[in-house]
Amino acid sequence: MKGARIDDRINFLRGIERDWKDWSAGKNTKPHWIFLVGVLTATGGLIFSFWSGNQRLTVASFAIGIAFILAGLLQAGETWEEKIQKKIRAYEPLDIDAMRTLAVSVFHKDELMPEELRKWLDAEFSAISDAVLRDGRKPHSGDIIN
C-alpha cells in the first residue's frame, strides 16, 4: 500500500474500524446469510412441493436447504483478531511508532486487544491528517501520501 492515495488509506482504515466496532460489540464473524438461504430454500421448496404434489421436489428442496445449513455450520470462521491482523499486514502505516507499539503489544500478550487496536487506528488517522496538513492544503481524494 506504499504511496497509496488518501482516500484509499482512509477507506482501508475505515474497514478495519468497522471490524473493530463489530468485534467490540461481540458480533460473530461467520456469515449468517448462508443459514437464511438454507432455511428459505428448504421452507419454500417444501411449501411449493406440497402445493404441487411433487414428492421428488420435496426431497430435493429439503436436501438443498439442509446442505446450505450444514455448509454454514461447518464453515470455519476466523476470529476477529485473525481477520483484522490480515488487514493490518496488508497496510503500510504512516505512523511507524504506533505500529511498533501495537506489534510489541501483540507479541508480548500473544493476542490483539481491541483497546490497543483503537489506539493504533486513532494514531494512524491522525498521521494521515498531519501528512495532509503538512502539505499546507486541503486533502483531495487523488492525493498521494508517502
Image (cartoon, helix red, strand yellow):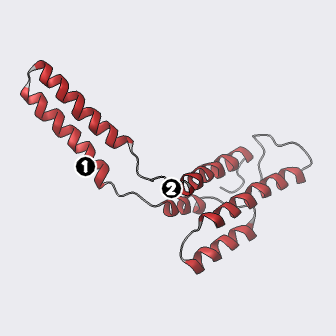
Residue 132 rendering spot, x and y as whole percentages: 84, 50
The amino acid type, in three-letter code, at marker 1 is: Leu
- Quadrant of the image occupied by residue 94: bottom right
For residue 50, side relative to residue 36 (left or right): left
Please state if 114 lies on the left or on the right of 51 as rendered.
right
- Report the front residue among 10 and 60: 60
Residue at image point 55% right, 63% down: 85
Q: Secondary structure at mark 2?
A: loop
Choose mark 1 or mark 2, whichever is in front: 2
Q: Reading the chain from its start, which is encountered first: label 1 or label 2?
A: 2
Q: Which mark is residue 70?
A: 1
Look at mark 2 in the image and give the residue it sits on: 26
Q: CA distance from mark 1 to mark 2?
A: 23 Å
Residue shown at 8% from the left, 21% from the top = 53
The quadrant of the picture occupied by the N terminus is: bottom right
Return the mark for residue 81: none
Asked whether, in this view, residue 128 is left or right of residue 69, the answer is right
